[in-house]
Amino acid sequence: MNKRARNRLIGITVIILLLLGALFYTVMSKSAATNMTVKEFAAKKADGKRVQVSGAVVDGSWNKQTNPMKFKIRDDSDSAGTGPTIDVQYSGGLPETFGDGVQAIITGTYVADGNFLKSSTMTTKCPSKYANETDAYTVELLLQRATDMQGIPIKVSGVIKAGSLGAPGADPRFVLLNATGSTDEVPVKFSGGLSSDIKEGTKVVVTGELDAQKTFVATEVALTK
């Protein structure tokens, strides 16, 4: 190969590499997400902009039956619930730890026509909670005193029944078995998030109330200490 042909080949190679580099930069720029808080997002909306927003799922704002699923998030630090919220339309797989109050990290794009964040990518964080079972009822004792226990805030300890642990939104979320001695069990409703440490067969303490249908409506589910 003569010098002129070699220089021409080198020049073409350089041009191709530059074009590939520019293409890679363009793709990465479009796919990169800007990290924002809920408050920042509410103040700096940009139609079509890809963002990653972290916030707490607003209690009672979600319904798993909608498609795509709709819910709201607010800043984790907004304990009073007086700050801005973001409407989310989510079409991806629902994490097992999803629920009321759970920290959700949403990646998606803002849609001005409808004022919502459209997403198919979400991760959630639900830290493990622990509770002492010394002052908790057993499932057996709870059912023995069911008439007197209805509507009274109490704690109950037991084991999550194998095959009963449902996905977020399931009714019941799981069935609680008496830990020892009997086969008594009670269905448990829970709209909050369960930590990834809670599995079938795990011993837990649930806080809440027994309703008229003998279903335990839980406000908190914790691992036993």
Image: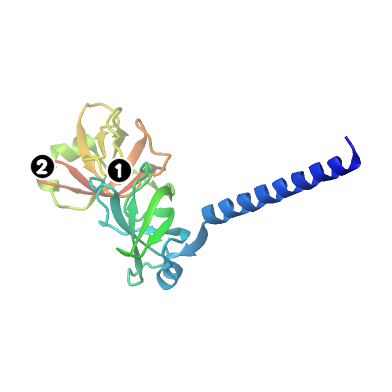
Instruction: Quarter of the image for the N terminus: give it.
Output: top right
Q: Residue at x 31, y 33 (%)?
A: 159
The image's mark for residue 87 is none
Up the image or down, 85 lies above or below 160; here it is below
| Number of marks in picture | 2
Compared across the picture, whether 199 is left or right of 150 comes to right
Q: Nearer the viewer, residue 59 or 22?
A: 22
Asked which secondary structure carries label 2, the reply is loop
Up the image or down, 44 lies above or below 152; here it is below
Q: Nearer the viewer, residue 29 or 95?
A: 29
Q: Nearer the viewer, mark 1 or mark 2?
A: 1
Quarter-of-image position of residue 185:
top left
Q: Picture coordinates of residue 143 (x, y %)?
A: 15, 37
Asked which secondary structure carries label 1, the reply is loop
Up the image or down, 36 lies above or below 212; here it is below
Quarter-of-image position of residue 2:
top right
Compared across the picture, whether 143 is left or right of 44 comes to left
What residue would you read off at disc 2?
A: 213
In this figure, which colouring scheme has been used for the structure?
rainbow
If you read the primary sequence from the N terminus, does the residue marked by circle 1 or circle 2 appear first?
A: 1
State the separation of the CA atoms marked 1 and 2: 21 Å
**Is disc 2 surrounded by few (<14), some (14 to 19) or many (20+) residues within 10 Å?**
few
The image's mark for residue 168 is 1
Q: Nearer the viewer, residue 88 or 29?
A: 29
Q: Picture coordinates of residue 212 (x, y %)?
A: 9, 45
Up the image or down, 61 lies above or below 66; here it is below
**Is disc 1 surrounded by few (<14), some (14 to 19) or many (20+) residues within 10 Å?**
many
Q: Residue at x 23, y 41 (%)?
A: 188
